[in-house]
Image: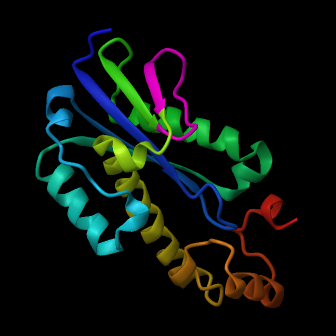
Amino acid sequence: MKACWIAGVDEVGRGPLAGPVTVGVVLMREKEAKRLPPLRDSKRLTQAGRARVVRKYILEKGAKYALASVSAKVIDRRGISAAVRTAVRLALQRVGARPGVCKVVLDGNLSAPIKYYQKTIVRGDETVPIIALASSVAKLHRDRLMKRYAKRYPGYGFERHVGYGTTAHYAAIRTLGPSEIHRRSFLS
């Protein structure tokens, strides 16, 4: 298939005890994506570093991007894998990725709906710049969301651990009980 557009896809928030799972998609012309410099995996960047990467390579270059988050309640009801598949599908729809003219490259074990020409790349967020961009967009969004949740649900420390299972987070759950955004199925 000769695609003229490429969509990089990555997810964040698969493992936390609280909050949504979020998928980021960055869509660019393939020739522009090939000109991207090597980018660091979003997990190795600070929040400010992720914001700089997003501003420089997406906002200033006019690339399209979209996000889709699936809530803890849906994760509990349908499972994390189904929630991630839903988020991938929604984010691709929102960014306007069209099968037949868009190749999709995904990180890790992600997959897109079968109508897309796609390639999954293990550690793609470390080796494929457009996937690294999608990772940065998703992580920036989810971390900011969790910091807003910290104000709504004080005492859990979401502003520090963004929902991951730290010792302090488990202690807060024992003291306060789970909040509305906790994944009950992850706490059992």
Quarter of the image with the C terminus in it: bottom right
Residue most extreme to the right:
188
Q: How is the image coloured?
A: rainbow
- Residue for point 32% across, 21% down: 102
Residue most extreme to the top:
1
- Compared to residue 165, the image places residue 93 above or below, namely above
Q: x, y percentage for residue 1?
A: 33, 8
Q: Nearer the viewer, residue 159 or 46?
A: 46
- Residue for point 19% across, 59% down: 55
Q: What is the count of numbered marks?
A: 0
Quadrant for residue 185, please give it.
bottom right
Please give left or right for residue 99 compared with residue 151 in the image: left
Question: What span is in magenta?
Answer: 107-120
- Residue for point 42% across, 42% down: 124
Helix, strand or loop: magenta stretch = loop
- Compared to residue 183, the image places residue 155 above or below, namely below
* Residue 110 painted magenta: yes
Q: Nearer the viewer, residue 115 or 43?
A: 43
- Compared to residue 185, the image places residue 18 above or below, namely below
Q: x, y percentage for residue 23?
A: 48, 47
Q: x, y percentage for residue 71?
A: 63, 55
Q: x, y percentage for residue 161?
A: 56, 78
* Residue 113 painted magenta: yes
